[in-house]
Amino acid sequence: MANHKKFSDDTLAVHAGRHPQDNFGVVNPPVYHASTILHPTLDSWEGRKVGGSHKSGRHSITYGRHGTPTQFALRDALTALEGAADTELLPSGMAACGLCFLAFAEPGAHFLIPDNVYEPVRKMALGHLTQLGCVSEFYDPAIGSGIADLIRPETKLIWTEAPGSLTFEMQDLPAIVKAAKEKDVIVGIDNTWGAGYFLKPLQMGIDLSAHALTKYPCGHSDTMMGSISCATDALFAKIQVASRAYGNSVSPDDCYLVQRGLRTMPTRLHRHFESGLKIAQWLEQRPEVSRVMHPGLESHPGHAIWKRDFTGACGLFSILVDAPDRDRLAAMIEGYDLFGIGASWGGFESLAVTSYPKRARTATTWEETGQVVRLHIGLESPDDLIADLEAGFERLAGH
Ligand SMILES: Cc1ncc(COP(=O)(O)O)c(C=O)c1O
């Protein structure tokens, strides 16, 4: 696939990164298992260069940890979808988020992080990054252009997550980018919810787009991986140097699974979007639900931002449930036929979990009294899912 720019994302998801004619016509990139790569001559051994991808023409394989055509194929596909200069692969989504900080970590470095951030990022910032001498400051996700007042000379990275993956506040990303550019500060995003498809952060001027590929690109709840797509070669070099320093490496089998998932991701995402919105609208009418936190709903405070910046919504959103007590809440959730209880999201199946945003906020307060239940709407029939939720409300009422 020579010229990525002329194709739509749906086409890129199907074709980018694949080179069948390099592989006997085989449609999918082969899985190369490798640690040692043999060199034919001493000159080749001593002149080896690490890194490379098909896309950049720097296709050079030197050691298994640094990637083979299997990893390069996935990198290239993600790079095309994000419109990036290049993409680094990491062993998990958290590793990808973490490396965005680690690459800029030094004593005195200042990081700005939204208060509703994915909780392990908060823990890393307050733990390991503090140990390295960095200072993390949490900000109201609704801050918008007000972020300018928090930027210091030593600010190395403004982190964003839109929407937050528990409480679904939207962020005014263009306003944050504008403020950051004026002060020459890097902006990174956890783009897992937008999946590299419904949101195009690099086209908005964001520098680093991190993903938990574990979610929609994999799509089958059976693989862990993360990625960082970088806006420029210089940023990619910075990220790659940090990644290499820590010896990050991803398995070719996992790359195969993720790139295989990626081929159907747009089709799946449209179904998640449609079913999720339908169910969110149904939930809005339920007396047991005091709020539905889905940015695609007109009632959502961030709806206008979502409409401006996103082309769709994935299947993840939360509701606030008025639960009389814990036993009834447990009866509601444990009794679902189709919604499983478990971490992660983005697979083909539906999930329901409780969450407690009050516990993890420092720059803002979470005043809601209802129980937050986060739903992942999978690829089942939305009518079956609605029936399952409806039966759950019966159990909540004690019937
Ligand atoms: C928003 C968000 N970012 C990052 C991650 C981390 O991804 P992983 O589980 O692959 O480490 C998650 C996982 O749930 C997430 O929800």
Image: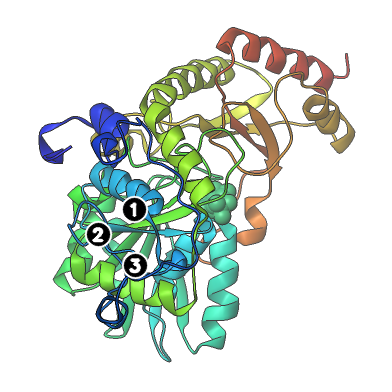
Answer with mark 1 or mark 3, whichever residue precedes in sequence.
1
Q: Which residue is mark 3?
A: 158
Above or below: residue 361 compared with residue 389: below
Location of the C terminus (image quadrant): top right
Mark 1 and 3 residues: CB-CB less than 8 Å, in contact? no
Q: Which residue is mark 1?
A: 72
Within-10-Å neighbours for mark 1: few <14, some 14–19, many 20+: many
Marks 2, 1: nearer the viewer: 2
Q: Which residue is mark 2?
A: 59
Alpha carbon separation for disc pair 2 and 1 = 8 Å
Marks 2, 3: nearer the viewer: 2
Within-10-Å neighbours for mark 2: few <14, some 14–19, many 20+: some
Mark 2: which secondary structure?
loop
Mark 2 and 1 residues: CB-CB less than 8 Å, in contact? yes
Out of 235 and 141, give the one closest to the viewer.
235
Alpha carbon separation for disc pair 1 and 3 = 28 Å
